[in-house]
Amino acid sequence: MFGITYIFTDSYIMSVPRNYIAKKIRVVGMFITCNICFSFWAGLALSLLYFSPTGYLLLDGCLSTGLLWFLSKGQNI
């Protein structure tokens, strides 16, 4: 989850499409430039499409957000 979120929200590879979408569609732009927002929705989508560790979609989204937060704090130590 951390890798997917980083690639879409912070990486140089996705900077051109990310900036284009953020300018054209503001609501979607907010979600693809925010690490916490994107990880929640990506966790929700992956739970729907692939595997749900808890069986509850909302909880899966929150779990992916918490995991991203925890991993990003580990980088700053």
Image: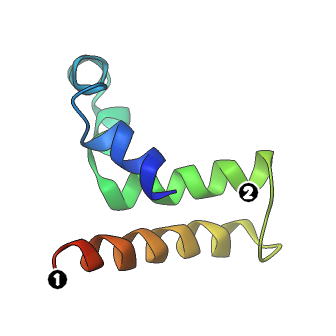
- Compared to residue 64, the image places residue 73 above or below, namely below
Rendered residue at 72%/65% (across/down):
57
Amino acid bearing label 2: Ser
Mark-to-mark CA distance, 1 and 2: 30 Å
Q: Which residue appears at 20% of the width and 21% of the height?
A: 23
Q: Looking at the picture, which amino acid does disc 1 mark?
A: Ile
The mark nearer the N terminus, 1 or 2, is 2
Dot 2: few (<14), some (14–19), or many (≥20) neighbours within 10 Å? Answer: many
Q: Quadrant of residue 13?
A: top left
Q: Residue at x 52, y 56 (%)?
A: 1
Query: Percent from the top left, x then y, of residue 3?
Result: 44, 50
Q: Which mark is residue 13?
A: none
Q: Looking at this rendering, what residue extends furthest in the left direction?
A: 76
The number of discs equals: 2
Displayed quadrant of residue 9: top left
**Percent x, y for residue 14?**
31, 26
Q: Which mark is residue 77?
A: 1
Cβ atoms at labels 1 and 2 below 8 Å apart: no
Q: Is 38 situated left or right of 56 in this image?
A: left
Helix, strand or loop at disc 1?
loop
| Disc 1: CA contacts within 10 A as few (<14), some (14-19) or many (>=20) | few
Q: Using the image, determine if residue 28 lies above or below residue 51.
A: above
- Front-lying residue, 16 or 41: 16
Residue 15's image quarter? Answer: top left
The image's mark for residue 47 is 2
